[in-house]
Amino acid sequence: MPEEIVRGRSLGEIREAWANKLGLASSALRLETLEKPGLLSRQWKVRVAWDESASAESPLGSASLPVGAEKSSPPRHIAAAVREEGFYRIHCPERVEQFIPFPRGGTLFYKGEERETPFTVEAGNDVEFYPCVEGGQLTWQINIRFQGLEAVAKVAKRRPGKYALPETIPYETTLSIEEHAFWEEGLLAGEYWDKEHLAEDLRELKIVYGIREEAWSEILTAADGEEVVAAKAKAPVPGRPPRLAELPDRNQVMAEERDRIDFFASKIELVPEGAVLARKIQGVPGEPGTNIFGRIIPAEVWKDFQFRLKQNVRLSEDGLEVLATCPGRPVKFDNYAYGVDNVYVLNQDVDLESGSIEFPGDVVINGSVQDGLRVVAKGRVEISGGVSHAEIWAEKGLSVKRPVYGGRIIVGEKYVFHSGLLRRLQELQGDLRESLRQTAELVAAAGAARLKSGQSLKLILERNFAKLPKKMAETESYLLGHKDELVTKEFMDSIHTGKRFLTGLGPLDPQSVPALVKVEEVLARIAAGMALEVPEHLKCSVEYIQGTTVACGGDFFCTKGAYNAQLQVDGDIEMQGVCRGGRVLAGGNVFIRELGGSEVSSTLVQIKGTKRLRVDYCHPNVLVTVNKEIIRIEEACRNLEIFRADGRVQVEKLRAGAWPGIRDRIEPGSSTPPF
């Protein structure tokens, strides 16, 4: 038995197609399913087998009827329908058991009586059929809907003509007129309205707007009882009310906060000056409509809104945007009221829950700052608690009411950078000038006639200025780490040139000495033009610090004590308590109530030659530097005052007697904090 493996959309389709292809009966095919439709294929895979001896069709005369079916036979009787004037005479040669009337098509009379229900006709009798003659009709009824938005014509339509009968009507025991009657078109004789009638009806109803030109053609093709829209109003076009768009999008901000994994990062939402807090997207007015009577349908009126401005915001020129007039934290007071806070108040500790604080204005913390966190503010920072191993950056001042342990404090970063830069620049320019002077003397010496200028420079650097190349490289790194108006291209080029000719084999270059002379001239000019001004109100005020690095561009004030702290202050320093260990570098005058301690490491105080150091009680093991001159305090003294006068450093002091301590019964030399 031959077979094929084929694919198809259904088993029936496969069976029919292969039966036609092979010329066999479909029953002669045997299908075996191999694959059903699935995810990768929507077709059936089957094996088709067939018997070649089977015939596609049964022999003539061998076809049999389905079970229970009977062979059809021609009707036994024929009735004659004779058309006469206005009616049909139907002659029935044999008896009709049921003669079924057709009331919609006409009236039946048998033996002079009108028949409306089925009846029996005896053999040889006649039945008269009077068809209903339609003269035709095309009328309508116009109705107003939806309060003048639409006029609808309900069509009443009748075709002209009547039902007719064929000349012969076959029947057996039942004869139905409806089964044999057919429509015969006649002449138009009924009520038939035209297009002008439609227009007149619309005028009578005072319909003047939205009349549809295609309404008449639709009426002609409409069925009886169908409705046709004769006129339709123009509906008002709704406008779009103004919409409020908040920037930045709060959903986006919250999503970014959820994705953030830095628990120490600042969580404060900030905006820069000029940022758009909210934008009003103007509404679009609606267009009025017109009903079918020509009256205006007003568009829906939406309610407008106006922004309400609070502190530190303004409107844009077109009045559609709320702009921040200063950097800070955006605040929304109600639906349309906006402001910007330039003071951030935190009534809790700065911890992992709050995150670090980065704010462009003032910061008030009614708590403490915990380990690893930082507070960065472009304004003033006030902390009612303490600080533990954290970073505090305050551009306009700092006040800490409780102790500070470890960490770093920077007050007035810009001024700190300027003072550090000037100090580095003066030291660098001085060393470079001196090294070039000594190089020139060596070149001019009689015993060094065989040395070239580069070799002489290399020799001077190795003997007397070994740290100068490193200082030049450190200055370059210091400048690259800051963006400031003092860091000009000329400044950077001169530092880069100096680094090139001072490091490695650079001094041996024939152009090294002339290039370094130009570098020294540029550095001297820049240093002379840098005027370091300490701002009047920039101040760092703490109660007690221990192991903390402090860089302050203004004045420094401590009420109780500083232990092993590294202080770099560009202004004055006033300590009403103890200063033990560490280093104090001051740009202004210094007053310390009690300085140093015999049981701690040496305490270093460095001041400028134009400033004064005053100490009420000074312990031994203290080093005081005035410019480059060092004064060692090797025994305790009172009322110590160090200053420069007449070109010499003056030291005034009294020998110390018993020292009762400044407060809280502190003993001289004690390293214990006063609380």
Image: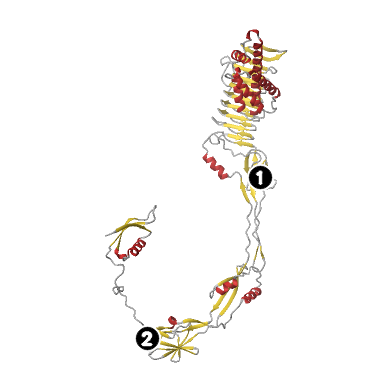
Q: Is residue 607 above or below residue 47?
A: above
- Residue 662 in percent (x, y) is at 63, 19
Q: Marks 1 and 2, how far apart in space?
A: 99 Å
Q: In this view, does 553 lie above or below 209?
A: above
Q: Residue 2 carries which label?
A: none
Most foreground residue, 657 or 429:
429
Give the labeled residue for mark 1.
322
- Residue 564 in percent (x, y) is at 57, 20
Please tell me in which quadrant of the rendered image residue 613 appears: top right
Most foreground residue, 326 or 493:
493
Q: What residue type is labelled 1?
A: Val
Q: Is residue 402 above or below residue 98?
A: above
- Residue 220 in percent (x, y) is at 57, 74
Give the labeled residue for mark 2.
77
Quadrant containing the N terminus is bottom left
Label 2 crowd (10 A; few <14 / some 14-19 / many >=20):
some
- Residue 207 in percent (x, y) is at 65, 71
Most foreground residue, 431 or 630:
431
Name the residue: 67% across, 40% down: 325
Please tell me in which quadrant of the rendered image residue 324 appears: top right
Label 1 crowd (10 A; few <14 / some 14-19 / many >=20):
many
**Secondary structure of residue under mark 1:** strand
